[in-house]
Amino acid sequence: MPTFVRDPEPVELQQLRERRERLGLDHYDEVWDGVLHMNPPPTVEHQYLVQQLYDLLGPLARRVGLVPLFQVFALGEGRDNYRAPDGGLHRTQPRGVWQRTAALAVEVVSPGDDSWKKFEFYAAHDVEEVLILDPEKRSVDWLRLTDGEYKPINQSSLIGLGPSELASQIDWPPTE
């Protein structure tokens, strides 16, 4: 359930943020134009899909000189506006906290998440391709930035793999 809290911020909210940081739960949070989005940790099924993507895409990426990072990372330029994709491919070795761009951003859809709403942000940060896995639908959508918007593609120009081929290699978790 989305919640909007006006300033001044209640002390309990600050305590919640500090607790989340202390426990490492804030790694999945994002800030959209100054608005904090607190995201829960991923399920085991979600993590299993991310691990498979690393196993499947990692060797292809390294073969063409890309650096795979299949762990949540901060894509943006600072604390006031960033997203946390589930993984990605980079043209150079990622360093530090804030990654200005990625060649590929990977999103695994969780119930109620905003994966599909990140495109404008990703385009503004020159992310070339976006890969979205939806475990509920057992679908793979692969999109490329073309003329300022993401459009579906049949094959990645980065690693030469397509969404259908990738989907057929995934061991999808059972759906409820």
Image: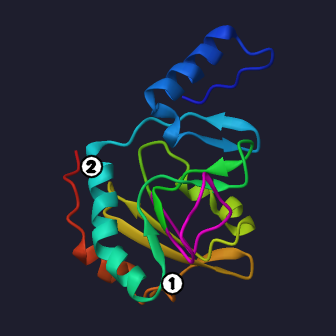
Left or right placement of residue 63 versus residue 124 in this view: left
Left or right placement of residue 38 versus residue 166 in this view: right
Residue 135 x %, y %: 32, 57
Question: Which of the 4 quarters of the picture holds residue 165?
Answer: bottom left
> Which residue shows up at 33% across the image and 80% down it?
59
Separation of disc 1 and disc 2 at Cα? 26 Å
In terms of depth relative to the viewer, which is nearer, 135 or 53?
53
Residue 130 x %, y %: 54, 70
> Which residue shows up at 50% across the image and 45% down it?
113
If you read the primary sequence from the N terminus, does the residue marked by circle 1 or circle 2 appear first? 2
Q: Say whether residue 104 is magenta.
A: yes
Mark 1: few/some/many CA within 10 Å (<14, 14-19, 20+): some
Residue 162 in view of the camera: no
Residue under numbered circle 1: 153
> Which residue shows up at 46% across the image and 61% down it?
87
Residue under numbered circle 2: 45
Q: What amino acid is at disc 2?
A: Glu
Question: Which of the 4 quarters of the picture holds residue 52?
Answer: bottom left
Q: Is residue 96 above or below residue 159?
A: above
Residue 77 x %, y %: 73, 54
Secondary element under disc 2, as helix, strand or loop, is: helix
Mark 2: few/some/many CA within 10 Å (<14, 14-19, 20+): some
Provide the residue span drawn in magenta: 89-107
Q: Say whether residue 151 is magenta.
A: no
Viewer-nearest of labels 1 and 2?
2
